[in-house]
Image (spheres, rainbow, N blue to C red):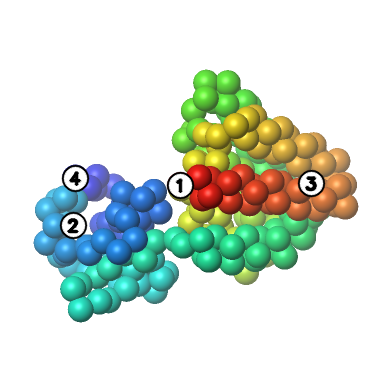
Amino acid sequence: MIDYKVVSLANQVYERIEESILNGVYAPGEILSENKLSADLGVSRTPIREALARLQADRLVDDSPSGTVVLGITQQDVDDMFAVKRRIEAMVTGQTAIRISEAGLTQLKDILEQQEFYAGKGNAEKVRNLDTAFHDIIYSECGSRTFQSILSPIHHKLAKYRKASLERDDRIFRAVEEHKAIFDAITEKDVKEVENLMQLHIGHAYDSITKFNDRK
């Protein structure tokens, strides 16, 4: 049942369906019935239609002769999204090192402390969610709404794969250590080191996600 809060009903419905697609609850190829979604979420079909239209614009669903079909995130999508991240995220993080506010630094430090705690508990979902917050702060503090609008949705759409990669080998601890090194370089405003560390972080994340896909 949808929780009626300040966020508009249409946005809540969109976020719930999007989350289910990105986390694999609705699998690629599955047909999404407006009636079933309406019953599952306890809302009328109007916000369902609005949400599906937005999700079609995001290329997460599409029309088919049988109804709205889930496209999800393919391996090609993952490859393409990481190609974008490789080309601009390191540069954006370098900009953040120059422009970040004291509030932004405090938020990053707090996230790192929480990540260390939850990594110790083996809670990949919490670490993944905090990873999202860590990167979102970097994007928001870089000073460019354009780069933020490109990178934040991409990182968000990789949620399922990021969580799965954190559950394998010792990636959960290595990811946190990489974040700590990036944070230290940002604190020092060492742009070159920040860019190098972020480039390595992106490469390690991609390698881990690729291994996850190979094992499925």
Give me the residue at 51% from left, 61% from top. 75
* Residue 47 can be seen, yes or no: no
Q: Quadrant of residue 127?
A: top right
Q: How many marks?
A: 4
Q: Which mark is residue 57?
A: none
Q: Residue at x 12, y 53 (%)?
A: 39
Q: Are marks 1 and 4 in contact (CB under 8 Å)?
A: no
Q: CB under 8 Å between callouts 3 and 2?
A: no
Provide the secondary structure element on which disc 2 rests: helix
Of 139 and 215, nearer the camera is 215
Q: Secondary structure at mark 4?
A: loop
What residue sits right under mark 3 in the picture? 197
Mark 4 = which residue? Answer: 1
Tell me how far mark 4 sits from mark 3, CA to CA. 42 Å
Q: What kind of residue is marked 4? A: Met
**Residue 68 against residue 75 in the figure, above or below:** below
Amino acid type, callout 1? Lys
Q: Earlier in the sequence, mark 4 or mark 3?
A: 4
Residue 19 placement (x, y as % from top left): 37, 51
Residue on which disc 2 sits: 37
Q: Is residue 141 above or below residue 117?
A: below
Residue 18 at what x, y percent from top left?
A: 36, 57
Q: Residues within 10 Å of mark 1 (few under 14, many from 20)?
A: few
For numbered disc 1, what is the local secondary structure?
loop
Amino acid type of the residue tagged 3 in the rendering: Leu
Residue type, mark 2 in image: Leu
Sequence-first disc among 3 and 2: 2
Rendered position, 185 above or below 149: above
Residue indicated by mark 1: 216
